[in-house]
Image: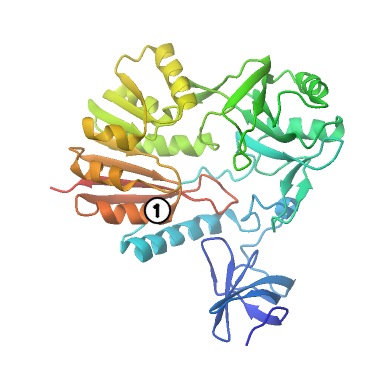
Amino acid sequence: MLTVGNKIVATAVDLDYLGQGVVKHEGYVVFVPHFLTGETAEIKIIKVKNQYAEGKIEQRLTSSNDRISHPDEIYGGADLLHLSDDAQCDWQKRITQETLKKIGGLDIEIEETITDFNSTHYRNKSVFHVMDSPMLKLGLYAADNSKLIQAKTYVLSDETTNQIISYLFDHPVIIDYKSFSHLVIRTNPEGKALVAIVTSKPLFKGQNDLVERLKTFKNIIGITLNIRDNPRHIMGPHSIVLYGENLITEPLGKMNVFLSDRSFFQVNLPVSMIVYDLIKRHIPKGKTIIDAYSGIGSIGFHLSDQAKQVIMIESNPESVLMANRIKDSYQFSHVEIICDQTENVMKRLSADVIITDPPRNGLMPEMVDEIIKSTAQQLFYVSCDVKTLARDLKMLGDQYEILKVYPVRMFPKTTEMETLAILKRRV
């Protein structure tokens, strides 16, 4: 019988949805982080429950051909950094298929994983934590989430972000770390950056020195002070402009979209565009499209050149503000933007196509009902949680046929998974 502190020698037989190696030993399933299928290791048991246990690698005895090594494995955000890119795509496809079958009872063939084959330095938005130190130290959580580790660069952040972080590493300022909690950097392909200093109060020790440091970068076009009013959230609802303006542009096909420091936008733009173009190819010209949970409207705007009408629904006022700014800039008279909960307004709308990109908890039951009762012939579901996707597809199954399911490697080197499901109304 396994007990905490036991050491066993075992071989991983699988890789679960959290990227943990799966070991079967004496009737227990043991989950071991950073352990790949086929590898053998000495494992120390750190937790035991009725039917499963958790362990950690004491010594790896054999290595998988899919294992790679990188110094940033010490950080927790890139929890699949040790797994090769091809193996990540295969893993995501398998997990997607297994989850849809287990939760939704959907035994369907999954398409190959969508990727742009670029797995590092892709993030256009990065969040760094301020460590408990009178001299500014920016850190990321360790792989076991036990502590923060100072970062000079980060494998997932883009070049501009790493230049800024590296400079602050070499030229720190004295700060009040009890008030200053995060530094958030948003960038674009032109190498421009919008930097948000996240604090609990509008003025803290070292603030002016930090701003002067940041202003030495010509590619920083805006610096804001964001007031964090909820410890459960990284950023608060209000920002104060300290330098430049609270605005950065991102390319979206033939357009540019506008973002503030608090706008939601995909952190991996090249892969996002692959998904948006795929959706676009499946929609005939001249259709009325509902873009639900639209954010700043990136999907809807990308489809606007071939749509009869685009109706965007978004509940976040900041995102709606940016969406209206884009609409006005391009004079899109056929785009309507509604600031409300999607479930509240769907019943009074009609469309040929519905695109839904909900948060992690998926569609509300009311939204599922409205989609079922709608006249929409096509449904595109962009999901950031395959478990809630499986649940929702099961509920939609009587009215909509699943044509394609694409795993999307939106966040390479991590266990975060996006999925695109393409459906059509049954005859």
162 up-or-down from 392: above or below: above
Quickly name the residue at label 1.
388
Q: Residue at x 63, y 65 (%)?
A: 65
Q: Name the spot of residue 180 as percent of width and height, x first.
A: 75, 33
**Which residue type carries mark 1?**
Thr
In which quadrant is the N terminus drawn?
Answer: bottom right
Would residue 244 be seen by someone viewing this image from the given angle? yes
Where disc 1 sits, the SS reads: helix
Q: How is the image coloured?
A: rainbow
Quadrant in which residue 20 is drawn: bottom right
Q: Name the spot of residue 174 as percent of width and height, x first.
A: 87, 31
Q: Residue at x 44, y 57 (%)?
A: 93
77 up-or-down from 176: above or below: below
Q: Residue at x 43, y 22 (%)?
A: 323
* Outermost residue, left side: 427
74 up-or-down from 37: above or below: above
Q: Name the spot of residue 296 as percent of width and height, x first.
A: 45, 27
333 up-or-down from 112: above or below: above
Is 63 on the left-hand or right-hand side of 14?
A: right
Count neighbours of disc 1 (C-alpha within 10 A) and say few if under 14, some if 14 to 19, many if 20 or more: many
Q: Name the spot of residue 262 as percent of width and height, x first.
A: 56, 29
In depth, the one of 260 and 94 nearer the eye is: 260
- Label tally: 1
Is 253 on the left-hand or right-hand side of 345?
A: right
Would residue 252 be seen by someone viewing this image from the given angle? no
Quadrant in which residue 224 is drawn: top right
Is 336 on the left-hand or right-hand side of 273?
A: left
Quadrant in which residue 260 is drawn: top right
